[in-house]
Image: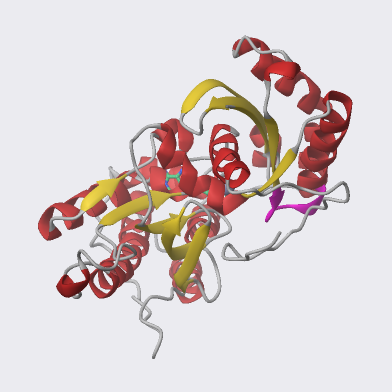
Amino acid sequence: MKILGIESSCDETAASVVEDGRIVKSNIIATSLDEHKLYGGVVPEIASRRHAESISAVVKEALEQADCALEDIDAIAVTFAPGLIGSLLVGVNFAKGLAVAANKPIVPVHHIRAHIASNYLTSDLEPPFLCLIVSGGHSHIVAVNSYTDYKIIGKTRDDAAGEALDKAGRIMGLPYPGGISIDKISGEGDPNAFTFPRPRIEGAPYDFSFSGLKTSVINVVHHAEQKGEAISIPDLAASFQKSVVDILIANLEKAAKDFGYENLPHLREAEPRCIKKIVLAGGVSANSLLRAKSQKLCKKRGWELYLPELKYCGDNAAMVASQGYYEFIAGVKAKADLNAYATMPIDIVNF
Ligand code: KG4
Ligand code: ZN
């Protein structure tokens, strides 16, 4: 079965053809990132306009590279939530037009579910598993019970990890996106030069909070500016990155212990939802320290670890086509009035 995936939730316009949810036939991405760099963050209006300009060519190229005509496609999968509303609407309406013209079904795909599916593209991973999803807009720990059944174990109470990294990068004067810049520059710095808080939330051991951390780094920079003191940006970046990664790993370890085989050995055979596989997903899963520390953790604990290939960590349409395939075979199909939504929980049952 061939699925055409379309993604336009943020600043990447992407299209891809994926066979049977796993085999990537094409993966085309056009991005307006360079324009947003001038403003230190994504400008929604610019992103929407660039989607409108490039989506036609991107979809055409994805079909051509996959050596596919539109008639060969079984369904069109499109990201409909969550994301920038103006950006999402471009992809959703393009998919609707294409579906009417070619008489094909549309499958609405949740962006965060798609990030999880990026792992299906390069491994034999199958649910159930426990997933840490860290992107610019989300930080979740989710039990993925099946390809379409999710249970949220923990989530951020305020900022997402990627958002905190991006804002911290900005205050440090590094190029947007801060997450990538901090990862690059941290190798030159001392991760123990600065101490940042490791916030824990009373009664919610799997939840995250990154806003205090963000305020701390802003305070460090402002304090130094006021005193006229020089700060080592590599040291600051390395210390900040370490604290973000430590928080993510600590909650992941706790969730995996509490929901995994270790604490529930009697359920090993009887309860298939019991988890032994740890999976990372989302833009921040490209972070070198997070990848290294999750590898170390899983080795120590004897858990299986799945990391998305670097080219599938950020926004792309192959992950949308993959998730679209699993949604489609589970019977999910959009009606003619399909809309886009800026927010949408991952565990919603009926779209
Ligand atoms: O998943 P994604 O491409 O878009 C959203 O759905 O949000 O994630 C973007 C986020 C940005 O915050 C970016 O700074 C972060 O992923 N990111 C990284 C790295 N690469 C991308 N953060 C840390 N280290 C990286 N190597
Ligand atoms: Zn994303």
Q: Which residue is drawn at the image coordinates 43% and 76% (left, top)?
A: 207
Quadrant position of the C terminus in the picture: bottom right
Establish if 33 lies above or below 64: below
Quadrant position of the N terminus in the picture: top right
Left or right: where does residue 49 sit relative to residue 229? right
Note whether residue 9 is visible. Answer: no
| Residue range highlighted in magenta | 80-86
| Quadrant hosting residue 278 | bottom left
**74 or 168, which is in the foreground?**
74
| Quadrant hosting residue 246 | bottom left
Establish if 39 lies above or below 270: above
**122 or 35, which is in the foreground?**
122
**79 or 125, which is in the foreground?**
125
Q: How is the image coloured?
A: secondary structure
Residue 218: percent from left, percent from top: 50, 68
**60 or 98, which is in the foreground?**
98
Q: Which residue is drawn at the image coordinates 32% and 44% (left, top)?
A: 288
Establish if 229 lies above or below 48: below
Q: Is residue 82 magenta?
A: yes
Q: Which residue is drawn at the image coordinates 83% and 28% (left, top)?
A: 103
Q: Is residue 136 magenta?
A: no
Establish if 298 lies above or below 36: below
Furthest-front residue in this view: 270
How many marks on residues?
A: 0
Residue 5: percent from left, percent from top: 65, 33
Residue 143: percent from left, percent from top: 41, 64
Note whether residue 15 is visible. Answer: yes
Q: Which residue is drawn at the image coordinates 74% and 17% (left, top)?
A: 71
Left or right: where does residue 204 sit relative to residue 26? left
Residue 97: percent from left, percent from top: 87, 32
Left or right: where does residue 183 sit relative to residue 58? left
